[in-house]
Every structure is written in C-alpha cells, then in structure tokens.
Image (cartoon, rainbow, N blue to C red):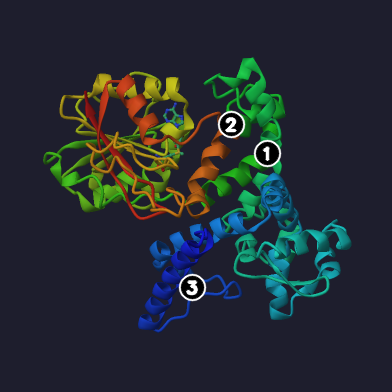
Amino acid sequence: MTATSPLSPLLKVISHGIASIEAGCAARGVSYPSLDTPLTPQSLAIQESFVTEALPVIAAAHQLMATLMNPRSFFNTLLFGSLQSVALGIAEAGHVAEILKEAGPEGKSAADIAKHTALDPQKLAHYLRFLSGLHVFKEVSPDHFVNNRVSALLDTGKPVSEIVAHPEAKYDGAPGLASLAAANSDEYLRAASYAVETSSNPRTSRSPDPSSSPLNIAFGTSADLFGWYELPQNASRMRRFANAAGSLHWTSPALGGFDWSTLPKGGLVVDVGGGTGEMVTELARSYKNLRYICQDQPQVIDQAKKIWHENGDVLNGTVQFHEHDYFTPQPIKNADAFILRFTLHDWSDPYSIKILKHLRDAATPKTKLIVIDAVLPYNCHSTGEWDDIPGGEQPTSPAPLLPNLGVASSDITYIDLLLLQVTNTTQRTVGELAHVLEESGWNLDCIHRFAPPAFPQSVASPA
Ligand SMILES: C[S@@+](CC[C@H](N)C(=O)[O-])C[C@H]1O[C@@H](n2cnc3c(N)ncnc32)[C@H](O)[C@@H]1O
C-alpha cells in the first residue's frame, strides 16, 4: 500500500479551481489579470467575479506552502511578519508607488526614487527588494524597480510634486491603502509592540475597558482610540485616520438580507450610531413606505444635516437626524426596527450589553434588531450548535482545506486582532454575538450572509 501524500489533494483543489476560472474567462473572452496587469476597476471586476472559485485555490496554495516549506522557514515568514508592515511603511513614506507610476514601464532606480525624500538609496533598495519577493513592486534590473498590481494600492493618485509640496494633505480624498499603510507602520505597529505586555499585566489583561488597549500603554494615554485621535498632538494622525478608516472598505448591502417589506406600512426604522445616514438613506430610496431616524453624536449629526441639506431634501422628509448617546436610555419607544451597523465591534461585552439593553428597554414585542458586523468564523467543523438558527452555521470548507479557508479569509481575522491592539475589542463569533444578545434580552433569530467580503446582517427579536 502506498502512503498517502498530503500534496496531491491540494494540487487537485488548485487544478480544479484554476480550470474553472480559466473556462469562465474563456467563455467571457477576458483574461484573468496577472500581477503585472494595471490595477483598474475593470481588471479588479474580473478578479472579483471569480472570488468563489479563487478562495479554495488560495487556501490550498497557502497550505501547500506550509506543507512544503521547512517548518523553520515557514515559521520565520510568520515570526518576522511585522517587517512586512515596516517595509510597506518605508515604501509609502518614500512615495515610491507614485514615483514609479510617473516613471511608467521603465521604472526607476532606488537612487532616483530616493531623491524625493530623505530616504537612503541603498537601504531603500533593500526594502523594495524584500517587498518584490512578496509580489509588491518588481525588481526589473539590479536596484531598479517598477510598480505592479499590488504596489499600485500604495498610489494616492496624486502627482509627486504635489505630495512633496504638501505632505500633510497626501491622504486627503485619496483612494488606495497609503493612509492605512502609514497608520499601520506608525500607531498600529507601536501599539502592537505592547500587546504581550498588555496581555500579561493583570491590570490590563482582562480589562474590558477601551482605555486598556496596547495603544493606551504604547502612548501613555487613558483616552480611547477616538479620544486619542482628537488630542491636538494627533491632528495629522486624525487627518490620516479619516482616510484610512474609509479605505478598510467595509461593505454590507442594505438590501437583499433582512426583508424590510415585512415591516408595517409607515413603520419606523432607527439607525443607532448611524453616522451620516448612509444606511437609512439607501433603505429610504427602496422602501418609501417606511420612516427613518439616524441617531449619532452631536458633531456627526451636524455634519449629516449639512451633507443631506446640500443634497436637497432628505427623501421628502422620510429621514430625520437626531442627536443621541447610545449609552443613555433610547428615547424612541415605537421603533419597528433598530439597526446597529459597524458599532458593536467597537465595544467589549459589558459596553455592548449596555447599548443593547437600552434598545431592549425601548423595544415593543415586535421590534426587530438588525446587527451588521463581521461574524468571525470558527476554524473547525460545525458541532451543530447553531443549526436551528437560519444562517447560524457558517459554511465550512471540506478537507484537506482549513474549515475557514485560512489566509483566503484573513481580511476579517486581521481586523479582529487589529481591534484588540487599538480598541481592546474583537469581532464576534456567532457564539459571542448570541451571548451579548442573550445577556441584554434579545434572541438571535437568523443571520443573512452575503458573498465575501460583505458583512452579514444578524437579526434579533425581544426575548
Ligand atoms: C464605525 S462608525 C459606523 C457608522 C454607521 N453605523 C455606518 O455604518 O456607517 C461608528 C459610529 O458610532 C458613533 N458613536 C460613537 N459613540 C457613540 C455614542 N456614544 N452614541 C452614539 N453614537 C456614537 C460614531 O460617531 C460613528 O458615527
């Protein structure tokens, strides 16, 4: 009997997925973008249209790497992973993506790239070579680099002359991930370097408080993340964060999950911590028979009113904006639905339960609660615990792949640990979500899931 190989089952997943992607491309007369294909909305759309086929291939390819590499070498790729953040931060600080975009296909030498900043050419070449080995930039001749599809994400789209003249405005209105790379190599990395200390110190390790994060220790502050950004000395970080937060690109379709038409005619939807009202105004365009209130902090509500005033009447007055602190009793007692979108993940359990209890106290027996946040998948096969809740069980992948597809679904797991560094919170698993709902008098009814990377809608009713 021949011993079974761990390799060929993975190869099979890869071959099957690639064949299906290539057949799909051929049927549509398009080519799958290579790493050298410019990053355009069209090429990205092609890539995204094959996400279902691509995810198992990505998971299998990474598992193949983990299997084939000497464990010591594979471990090193993880152990020194923070150096990837450092190198990306250096490339960003050197405006390398913008310089190489202006250079075109010829690219530029590290010496020429470094002329625009204080960076040392030789050291810069080492950082860029390291990144090129990870498929970010390409070294086309010794010390000479061009952009590729991945490095293009560092491009703010601004002329180098403008960035150099006004570095403080580099991220304003910019697409891409430059602001996130810069924040990551500054406040996030500094915070993360205190994670072990914060987790080992009994004063902070089990504390649920927003002032007990590694960021608090790193910067010697008792302010929570948002309060810290508002300190005068953090004005430029705050300006950068405004762009970086947007570039995280959290998506959750307003439509296609919870059936809003099941609410009574004239029913009231209240978006709690609703920001400037993107969710409710989107709903109001489709569900004209409902009324909407967006609640947030005074400064956000002022901003929302300005935005929507400039855009004309907010859908004939069907949307109203109210100031409300969600840690105080909810004043709207006749809501048919409360929404909490991208809100609970900012708060640990005791704080989330406080927010949820205020909504429960204001709920009628028929009020629905729609929580929109990532539901963090477990990395094991189901025990059936959530079988009786529609959508409660996250579909898992069959062996030999990891149940949650590992790196193929790592966008969520990175944010999960990033939250721990800066807000002392995490994304929640279905079990963790059900727990905070139960503790505050809500029952989890169902979870509407969308294709990745969109976040699901979890629907709850008064218990
Ligand atoms: C991540 S944003 C999400 C905004 C919106 N729900 C969305 O999905 O676009 C979190 C929001 O919570 C608001 N917020 C923070 N603390 C609050 C509080 N105590 N009461 C009400 N809103 C608050 C912030 O002003 C911000 O608009």
Q: Which sits in the foreground, 200 or 172? A: 200
Give the class, few, some or many, for how many residues have Cα within 10 Å of label 3's Cα (few <14, many ≥20): some
Q: How far is disc 1 from disc 2 in space, using C-alphas?
A: 10 Å
In the image, residue 412 above or below residue 161: above
In the image, residue 324 above or below residue 43: above
Q: Earlier in the sequence, mark 1 or mark 3?
A: 3
Residues marked 1 and 3 touching at CB (< 8 Å) = no
Q: Tell me the amino acid under the disc marked 2.
A: Leu
The number of numbered discs placed on residues in the rendered structure image is 3
Question: Would you name the residue on which mark 2 appears?
Answer: 225
SS assignment at label 1 = helix
Q: Is residue 299 visible?
A: yes
Q: Earlier in the sequence, mark 3 or mark 2?
A: 3
Q: Position of residue 45 (x, y in %)?
A: 43, 69
Q: Tell me the amino acid under the disc marked 1.
A: Glu
Q: Quarter for ligand 1?
A: top left
Q: Which sits in the foreground, 171 or 143? A: 143
Q: Which sits in the foreground, 271 or 29? A: 29
Q: How far is disc 3 from disc 2 in space, using C-alphas?
A: 36 Å
In the image, residue 214 above or below residue 18: above
Q: What number is the disc on residue 187? A: 1
Q: Position of residue 246 (x, y in %)?
A: 51, 49
Question: Would you name the residue on which mark 3 appears?
Answer: 43
Taking the spot 87% from the left edge, 63% from the top edge, the residue there is 121
- Name the image quarter holding the C terminus: top left
Would you say 356 lies left or right of 203 here?
Answer: left
Q: Tell me the amino acid under the disc marked 3.
A: Ser
SS assignment at label 3 = helix
Q: Position of residue 362 (x, y in %)?
A: 25, 22
Would you say 257 lies left or right of 29 here?
Answer: left
SS assignment at label 2 = helix
